[in-house]
Image (cartoon, grey):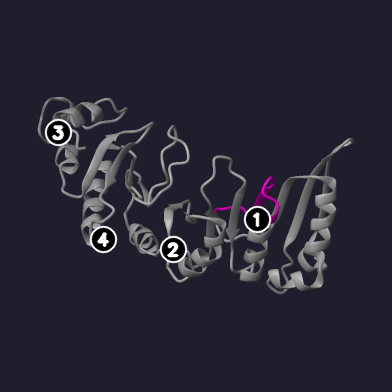
């Protein structure tokens, strides 16, 4: 559904900082023409920025041309905007929560759309969804745990994910997140993280790292029983698990369980390698 130009003008005029011509009934409001563009599916307000959904099947050059014009409008009106494309195959886990988009891109006043090409390239990878690049660090969503490693492998060949990225799977309770940094973690490590998530479905499984860039991660597993924590420590410390890490940068783990005395944590490294 497209909103009328008149309604869009009213939306924009509620913004904090707007060009005067957009609130005087003038047809010079830049969003009038933008929201009527053929690539637009919906053009409606969101909490904070204006959100514009474009056709996921639109050609990349058409989307990039449109994004350039939206960027000009964002700068003119000093308004942050979000472009997104819906994923027709996305699973709606909760009717109250918006399904993950195919991709999403935020435009800042005075910014550029240069990074959009990388987002569109990554979104074209089969099985990729939730493609987002924020603060220079991208993220993606895999359909299931079994799809995480293949998606990482496929996206690693794209410009956007060349240095790694954050990967999740759809879940009502966020219990799995994997920050993959190829400079520190091998695909053997990825496989083991996914395996742990599969073997301990009630645990929170996180391979975490600061996401402002390619930093060294730490593996966290929480909500284990004391016996599970001891068993998992032995499993991760086994010599064959050394292949999870890049030489010289052992992958550390923190396993947390709740005992009668309170919360207890067990720490170590994959393969038992000294730090």
Label 1 crowd bin: few (<14), some (14–19), many (20+), radius 10 Å: some
First in sequence: mark 4 vs mark 1: 4
**Is there a contact, CB below 8 Å, between mark 1 and mark 2?**
no
Image quadrant containing the C terminus: bottom right
Residue drawn at 19 percent across, 40 percent down? 35
Left or right of 60? Residue 128 is: right
Find residue 171 and report its image quarter.
Answer: top right
- Residue that badge 3 annotates: 5
Distance in Å between CA atoms under marks 3 and 4: 25 Å
Please state which of the two labelled residues, at mark 4 or mark 2, is closer to the viewer.
4
Residue bearing the label numbered 1: 198
Residue 37 on image: x %, y %: 16, 46
Marks 3 and 2 close (CB-CB < 8 Å) = no
Which label is found at residue 60?
4
Q: Magenta stretch: give its range.
A: 197-212
Residue 270 at x, y = what percent?
A: 76, 65
Task: Give the alpha-carbon distance from disc 4 to disc 1, as whole Å.
Answer: 37 Å
- Between the residue at mark 3 and the residue at mark 2, the CA separation in whole angstroms equals 35 Å
Dot 3 or dot 1: first in sequence order is 3
Toward which corner of the image does residue 269 lie, by quadrant?
Answer: bottom right
Pick whichever, 32 or 71, lies toward us: 32
For label 4, count other residues whose C-alpha is less than 10 Å away and answer few (under 14), some (14-19) or many (20+): some
Would you say 113 lies left or right of 272 here?
A: left
Q: What residue is disc 2 on? A: 160
Q: Is any part of residue 151 visible from this angle?
A: yes
- Element under disc 1: helix
**Residue 192: x %, y % from top left:** 68, 64
Which is more toward the observer, 252 or 135? 252
Upstream in sequence: badge 3 or badge 2: 3
Q: Position of residue 4 (x, y in %)?
A: 15, 32
């Amino acid at each position: 559904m497209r909103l009328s130009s008149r309604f869009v003008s009213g939306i924009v005029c509620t913004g904090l900082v707007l060009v005067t011509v957009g609130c005087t009934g003038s047809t010079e409001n830049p969003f009038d023409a933008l929201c009527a563009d053929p690539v637009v599916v919906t053009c409606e307000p969101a909490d904070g920025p204006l959100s514009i959904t474009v056709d996921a099947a639109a050609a990349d050059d058409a989307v990039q041309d449109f994004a350039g014009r939206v960027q000009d409008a964002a700068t003119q009106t000093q308004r942050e905007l979000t472009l997104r494309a819906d994923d027709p195959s996305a699973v709606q886990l909760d009717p109250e929560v918006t399904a993950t988009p195919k991709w999403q891109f935020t435009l800042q006043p005075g910014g550029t759309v240069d990074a959009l090409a990388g987002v569109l390239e990554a979104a074209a990878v089969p099985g990729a969804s939730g493609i987002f690049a924020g603060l220079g660090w991208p993220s993606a969503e895999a359909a299931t745990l079994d799809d995480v490693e293949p998606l990482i492998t496929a996206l690693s060949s794209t410009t956007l994910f060349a240095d790694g990225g954050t990967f999740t799977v759809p879940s009502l309770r966020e219990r799995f997140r994997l920050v993959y940094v190829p400079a520190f973690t091998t695909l053997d490590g990825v496989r083991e993280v996914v395996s742990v998530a599969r073997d301990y479905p009630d645990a929170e499984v996180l391979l975490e790292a600061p996401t402002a860039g390619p930093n060294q991660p730490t593996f966290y597993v929480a909500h284990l029983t004391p016996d599970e924590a001891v068993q998992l420590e032995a499993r991760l410390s086994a010599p064959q698990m050394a292949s999870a890490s890049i030489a010289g940068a052992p992958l550390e783990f923190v396993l947390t369980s709740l005992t009668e005395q309170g919360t207890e944590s067990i720490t170590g490294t994959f393969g038992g390698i000294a730090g």
